[in-house]
Image (cartoon, rainbow, N blue to C red):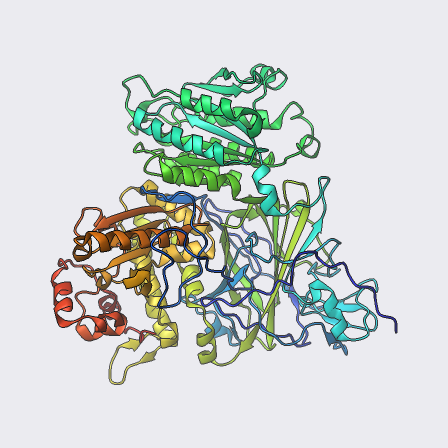
């Protein structure tokens, strides 16, 4: 038989088999040919305010990036225990506090599904993949095995699920195929490496519904080994690319050319304005020369700057008390003004505009100043839509694609549409707030329809009324971030926000074996309309319309088994279809399978504690809409931990106490951090800050979510090395420097004894700052960074995030914090005497209060 023609190969890329990570090992093995049935499409209940998306499944794991050398003195730190890989240091390191957040997470409940069977029979098929283990950097499962028994598999306190990051970027990326994919004609699933192939006829059997499909002769091969020439039959992740008019350009190349509108608050005091001007100057200098930028300032009026005069800065001014009229917009759109100009053409003028901004002159409190933020966004959107706004979107789409509106706000929207009164005691404040929220949400949806995202970067001490601004950012696919000031940290986030988006028109499809039911999904999307995607005869997928495609976000899926599983494997397939700004249509398909087991012990050993902890935390935080809810959720965490111990732990002899399962040794500590940390605890003061943090957490990627849940503690050692330790207050040793990474906050603590030694403390501080920059180089939003000495007032930020273990007996301290054994008796005595007494539970005391024995520390 002649050798079949080889499929086109991707140039410059290798197969997408992720390297193992020390956090998320993932045994995924080869499928059997046992038949499955597939559920019919599930109808979903109406999306609630915080929504609930029903979906179908995911595959999980994490690939790290290589560790780079540090670039600043005192040289590269050497880690004495395994460290998560870090990226290269960034240009600027934030120095001021800045709680941050993405748009609010949404969750959709899944209704029950009926069953169908296509009656497929067993065929003498050949597999296209050998037995091998791989990891997917796009999906993280809470366990790498699935329990066959429904009763134990569906224990709600522990649960089973996955975190899916369909827009994540890795190097090397997935295999790229420049042709249409082969899809099941029955359910719509994609051909993949687990499909059974009839090599003689080229027919392939769907892993989801077991339907036999034709490949139009493409998969005909002399043997199963020859099938590996097709990337989709040898790799778990594939990108199908249909080239747009401008040709396919990688996401990392295309993102930087997206047009940007800067909306700048005119009502700032001099100190804040000076910081903002510095950040804006640095921001425009960092942009690629071809980026088109527009500048609008807003107060009581909206000023749109015109770049048509060459070296002269001028502005067209519109009233801010109402939405712009058609006549005023026509004068802008059809006039001779140039409101979006390439950096290379207008950079000097842009710097002139920023330098000419003046501080607020009137003696009016910050919260009472008139700001027409809503009108300014409307004007920016009108300019983006251009003169053919009444024509369909496909016709008016400009070469350059998506736009981003970035609002630099120092206070609330108190003037014009979408505004609220200056004072909370206004008799109609509650009604006006509700009306403003709905108007802002509608404005954000309008922006999304025109491929524009709205990011709102707030700073200063004036409350910005987060409940009003959050709907605008959320519904457009943007973010809302809080900062303490407009300084260096604000500038870092301004730069990272401008380059983070990967695509638009995202549609996320989830399919899984009929044994699995997805009960809840939390993430940045909403149920897709039926006419927004292709449907198939028995398509059981659930489709989510994604507001934007970004590597900084993820979806949290909760799953259950519908009954006792009889098959050896269950299958999951995720597909995200989106357009990049060069109008190339990309379909990323990720297929995973997990083995099923009867043994509870095998199942527990396969649990990925970090992933399970993040999934539990997201399900819990979703219900903490206000502070009183957060208090209730702490009690829910207590009950959850008790139930896990009762279901999977062991009772001590002649005792009512239960030991938490040793296979899950780090999970209860993560949940203890959850109940006392910033997500559910009271260590940050203002409800706006807590709300922003929760919204960020619900949508954040696995890496950021994990750090926000459980802080990472690193102690500096002699010679510039770092030792990773449990996040206990026992790390506060006077002769040491400690770095604590809590996701949105990063702290450097210097012990008093070390701080007194000028040379040593300077070297230790430099090493800690270098490490901090390494750890947060690619993080968005960039964390606030604070450095302080033992005993200072700011040290409370650090102490409040550590587990208080100083009251525990010495044997418990050593069991959970082994580094103590290296201290001399004198050092231990000084450490003990340095703590102040307070009533907070230690981790061991909390476990005992629940009638539980802590697991042995691994």
Q: Report which quarter residue 183 is drawn in.
A: bottom right
Q: Residue at x 21, y 62 (%)?
A: 841
51 to the left or right of 801: right
Residue 845: image location, x then y, percent = 22, 67
200 to the left or right of 760: right
636 to the left or right of 348: left
Q: Report which quarter residue 838 is drawn in.
A: bottom left
Residue 612: image location, x then y, percent = 43, 64
834 to the left or right of 654: left
Task: Identify the residue at the far right of this view.
Answer: 1
Against 157, residue 702 (above or below) is above
Q: Is residue 806 visible?
A: yes
Residue 174: image location, x then y, percent = 63, 58
Q: How many marks?
A: 0
Against 747, residue 294 (above or below) is above
Against 131, residue 46 (above or below) is above
Task: Identify the residue at the far bottom of this view.
Answer: 653
Q: Camera-side residue: 349 or 689? A: 349
Q: Is residue 426 visible?
A: no
Residue 635: image location, x then y, percent = 30, 59
Q: Residue at x 32, y 65 (%)?
A: 723
Q: Camera-side residue: 502 or 147? A: 502
Q: Quadrant of the C terminus?
A: bottom left
Q: Camera-side residue: 300 or 238? A: 238
Q: Residue at x 49, y 16 (%)?
A: 318
Q: Quadrant of the N terminus?
A: bottom right
């Amino acid at each position: 038989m002649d050798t079949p023609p080889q499929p086109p190969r991707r140039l410059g890329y290798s197969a997408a088999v992720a390297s193992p990570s020390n956090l998320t090992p993932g045994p995924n093995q080869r499928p059997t040919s046992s038949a499955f049935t597939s559920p019919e499409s599930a109808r979903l209940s109406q999306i609630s305010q915080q929504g609930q998306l029903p979906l179908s499944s995911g595959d999980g794991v994490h690939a790290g990036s290589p560790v780079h050398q540090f670039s600043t003195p005192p040289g590269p730190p050497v880690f004495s225990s395994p460290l998560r890989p870090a990226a290269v240091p960034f240009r600027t390191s934030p120095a001021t506090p800045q709680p941050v957040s993405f748009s609010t997470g949404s969750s959709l409940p899944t209704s029950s599904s009926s069953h169908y069977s296509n009656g497929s029979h067993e065929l003498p098929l050949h597999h296209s993949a050998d037995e091998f283990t791989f990891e997917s950097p796009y999906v993280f499962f809470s366990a790498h095995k699935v329990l066959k028994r429904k009763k134990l598999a569906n224990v709600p306190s522990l649960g089973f699920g996955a975190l899916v990051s369909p827009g994540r970027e890795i190097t090397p990326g997935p295999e790229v195929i420049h042709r249409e994919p082969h899809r099941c004609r029955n359910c719509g699933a994609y051909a993949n490496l687990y499909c059974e192939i009839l090599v003689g006829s080229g027919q392939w059997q769907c892993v989801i519904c077991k339907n036999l499909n034709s490949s139009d002769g493409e998969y005909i091969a002399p043997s199963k080994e020859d099938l590996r020439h097709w990337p989709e039959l040898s790799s778990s992740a594939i990108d199908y690319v249909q080239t747009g008019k401008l040709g396919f350009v990688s996401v990392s190349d295309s993102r930087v050319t997206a047009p940007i509108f800067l909306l700048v608050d005119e009502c700032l005091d001099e100190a804040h304005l000076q910081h903002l001007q510095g950040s804006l100057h640095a921001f425009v200098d960092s942009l690629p020369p071809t980026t088109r930028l527009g500048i609008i300032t807003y107060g009581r009026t909206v000023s749109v700057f015109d770049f048509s005069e060459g070296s002269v800065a001028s502005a067209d001014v519109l009233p801010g008390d109402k939405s712009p009229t058609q006549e005023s917009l026509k004068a802008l759109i059809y006039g001779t003004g140039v409101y979006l100009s390439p950096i290379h053409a207008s950079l000097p003028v842009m710097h002139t505009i920023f330098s000419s901004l003046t501080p607020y002159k009137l003696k009016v409190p910050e919260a009472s100043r008139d700001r027409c933020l809503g009108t300014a966004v409307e004007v920016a959107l009108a300019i983006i839509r251009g003169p053919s706004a009444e024509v369909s979107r496909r016709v008016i789409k400009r070469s350059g694609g998506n736009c981003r509106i970035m609002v630099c706000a120092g206070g609330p929207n108190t003037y014009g549409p979408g505004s609220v009164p200056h004072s909370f005691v206004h008799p109609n404040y509650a009604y006006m707030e509700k009306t403003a929220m709905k108007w802002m949400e509608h404005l954000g949806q309008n922006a999304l329809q025109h491929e524009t995202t709205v990011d709102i970067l707030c700073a200063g001490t004036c409350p910005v009324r987060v409940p009003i601004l959050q709907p605008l950012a959320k519904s457009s696919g943007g973010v809302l971030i809080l900062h303490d000031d407009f300084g260096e940290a604000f500038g870092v986030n301004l730069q990272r926000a401008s380059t983070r988006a990967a695509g638009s028109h995202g549609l996320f499809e989830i399919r899984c074996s009929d044994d699995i039911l997805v009960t809840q999904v939390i993430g940045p999307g909403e149920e897709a309309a039926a006419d927004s995607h292709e449907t198939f005869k028995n398509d059981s997928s659930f489709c989510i319309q994604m507001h934007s495609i970004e590597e900084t976000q993820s979806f949290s899926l909760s799953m259950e088994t519908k009954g006792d599983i009889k098959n050896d494997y269950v299958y999951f397939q995720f597909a995200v279809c989106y357009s990049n700004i060069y109008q190339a249509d990309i379909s990323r398909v990720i297929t995973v399978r997990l083995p099923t087991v009867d043994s509870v012990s095998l199942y527990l050993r396969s649990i990925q504690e970090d992933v399970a902890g993040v999934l539990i935390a997201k399900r819990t935080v979703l219900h903490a809409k206000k502070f009183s809810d957060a208090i209730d959720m702490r009690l829910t965490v207590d009950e959850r931990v008790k139930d896990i111990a009762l279901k999977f732990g062991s009772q001590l002899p002649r005792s009512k106490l239960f030991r938490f399962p040793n296979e899950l040794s780090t999970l209860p500590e993560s949940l203890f951090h959850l109940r006392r940390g910033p997500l559910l605890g009271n260590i940050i003061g203002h409800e706006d800050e807590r709300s922003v943090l929760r919204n960020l957490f619900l949508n954040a990627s696995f890496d950021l979510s994990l750090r926000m849940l459980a802080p990472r503690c690193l102690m500096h050692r002699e010679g510039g090395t770092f030792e990773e330790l449990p996040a206990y207050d026992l790390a506060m040793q006077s002769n040491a420097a400690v770095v604590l990474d809590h996701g949105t906050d990063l702290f450097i603590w210097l012990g008093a004894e070390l701080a007194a030694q000028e040379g040593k403390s300077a070297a230790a501080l430099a090493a800690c700052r270098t490490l901090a920059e390494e750890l947060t180089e690619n993080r968005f939003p960039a964390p606030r960074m604070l450095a302080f000495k033992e005993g200072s007032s700011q040290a409370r930020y650090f102490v409040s995030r550590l587990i208080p273990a100083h009251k525990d007996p010495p044997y418990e301290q050593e069991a959970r914090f082994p580094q103590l054994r290296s201290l001399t008796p004198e050092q231990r005595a000084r450490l003990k005497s340095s703590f102040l007494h307070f009533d907070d539970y230690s981790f061991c005391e909390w476990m005992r209060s629940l009638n539980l024995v802590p697991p042995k520390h691994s």
